Image (cartoon, helix red, strand yellow):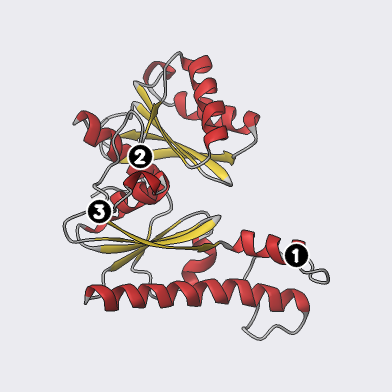
Amino acid sequence: MIANAEAKSERPRVVVIDIGNSSIAVGAWGDGQVSRVSRAPTWDGRAFAAAFDGVCGCLPQGRPAAIVVGSVVPAALDRVVARVKETVGLDARIVGADVALPIDVDLQSPESVGVDRVCCAAAAFDHVRQACTVVDFGSAVTVDVVGDDGRFLGGAILPGAGMQARALGEFAAQLPRAEIRFPSGPIGRDTISAIQSGICHGIAGAVRGIVEAVATEVGKWPQVVGTGGDLALFTPHCDFLDSAVPDLCLMGIGLAWVRQTGKSE
């Protein structure tokens, strides 16, 4: 089992990077664990450089043995790869390209599935050691399923909270852009709280419905693992979550490296 904690038996030597639509997460991977996690906005080059340098500074000699990257943003990936090469002189290894996916994907076109979804699924399966449903509350909300044999079976994708708020503000002439949070109750007493209720309670209800439909489809209730940038916002309102693991994608990237090399670091 893996956990988001400091490595106990040895100092980590591999840097893992998760490039998402909203943020980049950087962490140290070693002894089957992720530690020293730092985040930066995806398009803030200086913030990423500071995060990357900070993680590298915690490693022996301040230099990683390898850098492994999972990305769903091609343009940002190019920039991160260049920065890594410039900083430590190493070529980043890319999950889904020169590093194999961490689990098998049981779909007709496995290359079409986002690397983040597969990495989260791999880490969730490693976390619970059985069939599971993985909910990622990110820029998009994904609900994915892993079978008893550890294969990625597919899932569902819907717009995340920020995306929904931005769409309402941009495409509805008289609706303002609302801060993303749960209002005091489901009945909005003004426009802002009505938007907040619709988005937040709507996502929680939609995810519950998908999770229940998955359980009906597979004939049992799989363990439900939550993750993603908005995890803390939704966890108190999603009692169907069995566990919450903030750095699931980074863990999956580390597992991809283990599968590729056979080494835990």
Quadrant for the C terminus, please: top left
Residue at 63% of width from left, 76% of height from top?
Answer: 198
User: Which mark is in front, 2 or 3?
Assistant: 3
Task: Name the residue furthest front.
Answer: 108
Q: Position of residue 165 (x, y in %)?
A: 68, 64
Q: In whole angstroms, how far apart are the C-alphas of marks 2 and 1?
A: 37 Å
- C-beta proximity under 8 Å, tags 3 and 1: no
Q: Secondary structure at mark 1?
A: helix
Q: Position of residue 47 (x, y in %)?
A: 62, 33
Q: Amino acid at mark 3?
A: Asp
Res. 6 in view: no
What residue is disc 2 on?
253
Residue at 37% of width from left, 73% of height from top?
Answer: 211
User: Which mark is in front, 2 or 1?
Assistant: 1
Classify residue 12 by image quadrant.
top left
Packing grade of label 2 (10 A; few <14, some 14-19, many >=20) is many
Q: Position of residue 136 (x, y in %)?
A: 44, 58
